[in-house]
Amino acid sequence: MHCYRLRFCAPFHVDGRGTGSHQDGEPFIRSDTLSAAVLSAWALLEPEQAEARAAQPPFLLSSAFPYWRTHYFLPRPVASIALRLPEERLRESKPFKKIQWLHSDLWLQVVAAGDRWLAPANLTLWQDGLAWPQAPAEPLPHRLWAEEERPRLAMDRVSDGALDGQMFYFSRIHFDAEGGLYVLARFDDESARAGFEAALRLLGDNGIGADRHGGNGQFSWEAGQAPALPSATAGAAITLSLVNPAPEEVQGDGLVGAQYQLISRGGWIGSGTLRRRRLRMFTEGSQFSRPLRGRVVDVTPDGPAPYRVYRDGRGFWVGTGGVS
C-alpha cells in the first residue's frame, strides 16, 4: 500500500454530491472524483490507451483524507455513529455526534470496539469534526482547513455569457501550510505506479476541482508513510473509498450485519452541458461482513456524447482485526 500526501498551494473546490451547487464544497476528495481526475491527466500523457484505462484502471484508490504533519485522519466508521454514553455524560453527546474524522490511533480503537465504542472523557476535539485520543503533544493551529465563500456572477453554459442579476457564492477550501490531503493506493504493477505518479504530478500542475483556469486546486505531492491499518484479508471490512457493488455481490447474505450510509453521485461531463447518470454508492466508513469488490460503472448519459464516461466504484478495504 502506497501513500501520497497532497499539499495544496492554492485553495480548491470539489462538489461533494455533483449537484452543481458551488456553495456545497467538501474539505476532502472522494475516491471516484480523484480516480477520474488522475485518469484525465493520464489521458493527456498517453491518449492511445485512455478509454481502456478508464474502463479498467490499473490502480485502486482510497478517498483523499486530511493530514497534519505526521498525523493522519480517517473517516469515522458508520458503526460508531450510534454513540452510547452513560446518563451522567449525556450533555457531551452533541459535540461527539459532530465528529467526522478520527486520528488514526483513535480510529483503530473505535474499529476494535465497533458499535460498543464509548467515547472517552479525555477525547480532544479539534475544529469540531476532528478527534484525537488524547491531548496532542504539539500545539495545534486554530484550524486545519478553512472555508471561504466569494460572490460570483452566474454564467449561461450554452452561450457562455453572464446571467444578469443572478449571483451565487463560490466555496473554496484553504489548508494549513503543514497540512493537506493524503490518498492510499494499490497498483497492478510497477509500470502502473510510474504512470499514476506522472499523471498525479500533471494533475497537481493543472489543478483539481472547479475553477482550475484561475489557479485553484493546484498541489504538489510527496510519498508518505501510510498509517498502520488492519489488513482486509478475511472477515469484516471497512471501506476507505466509495463503493458501488455489482448486484450479485449484495444478494443473499451480502448485506447481513452491514452498517453503511449511501450517497448519490452525479455531475457534469467536463465543462460541457451534459450530465452523467447519477449513481448511488456506499460511503467511506461503511462496514460489511466481507469486502465487496465493487465495479467501474458506465455513466455516459443517454443520447450523443463526446466519449464514454465511467465512475470508479471499486472498494478500497481495510480490516477490523490486527494491524498489517
Image: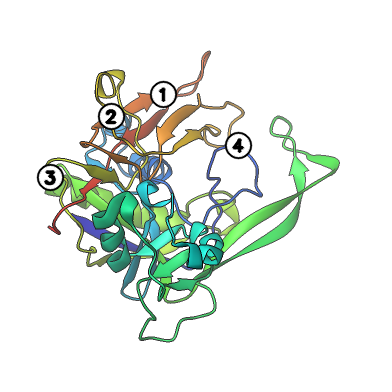
Residue 206 position, x and y percent, is 46, 54
Quick one: SS at disc 3? loop
Q: Which amino acid does label 2 sit on?
A: Val
Quick one: SS at disc 2? loop
Which mark is first along the chain, 4 or 3? 4
Which mark is first along the chain, 1 or 4? 4
CA–CA distance in space, label 2 to label 1: 35 Å
Tags 3 and 1 touching, CB below 8 Å:
no
Q: What residue type is labelled 3?
A: Asp
Nearer-the-camera pick, 240 or 166: 240
The residue positioned farthest toward the right in the image shown:
165
Mark in the foreground, 2 or 1: 2
Q: What residue type is labelled 4?
A: Thr
How crowded is the residue under tag 1: few (<14 C-alpha within 10 Å), some, or many (20+)?
A: some
Q: Quadrant of residue 58?
A: top left
Q: Which residue is under mark 2?
A: 256
Q: Which mark is residue 189?
A: 3
CA–CA distance in space, label 4 to label 1: 21 Å
Q: Which residue is under mark 4?
A: 19
Nearer-the-camera pick, 124 or 155: 124
